[in-house]
């Protein structure tokens, strides 16, 4: 078995009467915002974020489960179905039935998919556990190529590498058979995934990295190094498995922000919080608010639906009780999402790439005068009935101080929400202007914004006008 967080025995502190008081107080709070969305997914989408859950394929036929899933969530992570032991039970023989089931149910409900996980020390098939050296290294790259190719175009983001750092204060890599193949195994995994599915966002994912500590700093240093050297990494996932041994701390926002400042998206990927009643609800609220305060924290996923679905069910760590009723923690999370978290100016998206080295010229005085201007490219994640478009705005040879991107949507398509931009119009010719924190883009540097829509996404190259 892989590691599991230390568990604690929870005292049942809330009487039924006080639970009712908590719940009704929370309802009153919700009623204060007449425009508040009433599901987790819709509330998160109002600020350009997603709200997801881990899904187990064998539970999809449970109607209580699937009703909540399809009502509340707009992102799913297969809980076990895309792990190495599930997808390649014997070497070079692939099995996708359960993973495919989750993907197709997600597509038919306009939910996106976070693939989990391509390379991990845990839940490896027996044959891989007994490999080492170059045989294991090539088995890993073969696995990544096959799985990412099979799901190409269907995955919003992949957890390319999961849990590669050691717990404690060493800041070292976790010792594992993969680590023993050489320190470069992580970057090789990312490059292999990028080659197989260039449109998927590629994430590093870990636990006990939610706050600022030696382990998260070690991950931070790796991501910083990857960005400097051009190793393809787009996002960092923070699992968010909390209990009394690893509680919700007040520096989560600060930690998310420091990673975001490296130029990656950040997400809470496996949230569950041991506890009950008001204490648990308050913790949920503070994690959601931490994400909402960071512009590049673009999604939160809880690790299961009902407490009984949890991998640590005795901790009652989720948002719905065993019968599928909303807990006080659900209401707290929903209220936090509806509290209108947008972007925190102190943690805004960096607009410059790490270091842009311009080619030197032999005679600088004869270089052409810098011209303003920008260009934009679109990358699409399209599913049946909807899409997410990510637009990259790149400044020309001079710094720009603002931009407007024009996109033509195919007939029948409409923008439903957008992030890191102000949209004008929702169908046909739509324009997107910078917001306060991403208008200024240095020469040759880039910034990104995105929007979600129904119908078919734009395929033509967008126009870009600079100021
Ligand atoms: C867990 C699943 O929830 C369990 O069903 C399984 O038995 C073990 O793995 N970190 C991760 C997840 O990245 O994949 C783990 O999921 C929980 C810890």
Image (cartoon, grey):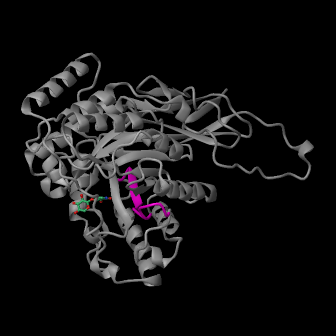
**Left or right placement of residue 331 versus residue 365 in this view:** left
Point out the stretch of residues depicted in magenta.
Answer: 155-170
Task: Residue 160: say if magenta.
Answer: yes
Residue 444: quarter of image: top right
Q: Residue at 51% x, 64% y: name it.
A: 191
Number of numbered discs overlaid on the protein picture: 0
Q: Position of residue 15 (x, y in %)?
A: 9, 34
Residue 138 visible within the image: yes
Q: Is 407 located above or below residue 76 in the figure? A: above
Whether residue 384 is visible to the viewer of this picture, yes or no, is no
Please state the quadrant of the image where ligand 1 appears. Answer: bottom left
Q: Quadrant of the C terminus?
A: top right
Q: Magenta stretch: dominant SS?
A: loop
In-image side of 38 versus 374 (left or right):
left
Front-most of 206 and 44?
206
Nearest the viewer among 170 and 124 is 170
Residue 163, x across and y down, in percent? 39, 62
Q: Residue at x 43, y 61 (%)?
A: 168
| Quadrant where the image shows the N terminus | bottom left
Q: Residue at 22%, 33% (x, y): give it.
A: 278
* Location of residue 154 in the rendering, given as x and y in whole percent from the top left corner: 34, 53
Relative vertical location of residue 112 with respect to residue 207 in this rendering, above or below: above
Q: In which quarter of the image is residue 346?
A: top right
**Left-right relation of 432 to 114:** right
């Amino acid at each position: 078995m892989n590691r599991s967080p230390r568990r604690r025995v929870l005292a049942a502190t809330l009487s039924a009467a006080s639970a009712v008081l908590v719940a009704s107080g929370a309802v009153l709070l919700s009623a204060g915002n007449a425009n508040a969305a009433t599901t987790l997914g819709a509330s998160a989408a109002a600020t350009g974020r997603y709200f997801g859950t881990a899904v187990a394929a064998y539970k999809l036929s449970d109607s209580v489960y699937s009703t909540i899933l399809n009502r509340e969530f707009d992102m799913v992570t297969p809980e076990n179905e895309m792990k190495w032991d599930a997808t390649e039970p014997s070497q070079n023989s692939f099995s996708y039935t359960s993973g495919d089931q989750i993907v197709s149910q997600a597509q038919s409900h306009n939910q996106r998919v976070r693939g989990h996980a391509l390379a991990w020390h845990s839940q490896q098939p027996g044959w891989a556990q007994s490999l080492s050296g170059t045989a294991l290294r090539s088995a890993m790259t073969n696995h990544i190529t096959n799985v990412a190719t099979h799901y190409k175009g269907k995955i919003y983001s992949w957890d390319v590498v999961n849990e590669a750092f050691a717990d404690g204060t060493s800041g070292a890599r976790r010792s594992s058979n993969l680590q023993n193949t050489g320190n470069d195994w992580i970057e090789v995994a990312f490059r292999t995934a990028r080659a197989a599915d260039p449109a998927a966002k590629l994430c590093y994912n870990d636990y006990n990295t939610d706050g600022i500590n030696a382990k998260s700093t070690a991950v931070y240093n790796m991501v910083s190094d990857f960005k400097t050297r051009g190793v393809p990494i787009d996002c960092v996932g923070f699992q968010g498995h909390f209990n009394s041994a690893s509680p919700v701390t007040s520096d989560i926002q600060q930690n998310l922000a420091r990673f975001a400042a490296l130029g990656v998206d950040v997400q809470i990927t496996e949230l569950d919080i041991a506890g009950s009643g008001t204490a648990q609800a308050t913790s949920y609220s503070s994690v959601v608010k931490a994400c909402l305060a960071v512009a590049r924290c673009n999604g939160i996923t809880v690790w299961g639906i009902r407490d009984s679905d949890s991998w640590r069910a005795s901790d009652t760590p989720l948002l719905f009780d065993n019968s599928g009723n909303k807990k006080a923690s659900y209401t707290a999370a929903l209220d936090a999402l509806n509290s209108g978290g947008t972007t925190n100016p102190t943690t805004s998206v960096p607009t410059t790439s790490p270091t842009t080295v311009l080619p030197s010229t032999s005679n600088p005085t004869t270089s052409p005068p810098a011209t303003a201007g920008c260009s934009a490219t679109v990358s699409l994640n399209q599913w049946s009935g909807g899409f997410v478009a990510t637009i990259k705005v790149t400044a020309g040879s001079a710094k720009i101080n603002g931009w407007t991107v024009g996109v033509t949507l195919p007939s029948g398509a409409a923008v439903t929400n957008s992030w890191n931009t102000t949209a004008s119009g929702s169908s046909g010719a739509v324009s997107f202007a910078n917001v306060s924190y991403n208008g200024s883009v240095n020469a040759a540097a880039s910034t990104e914004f995105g929007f979600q829509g129904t119908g078919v996404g734009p395929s033509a190259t967008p126009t870009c006008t600079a100021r």
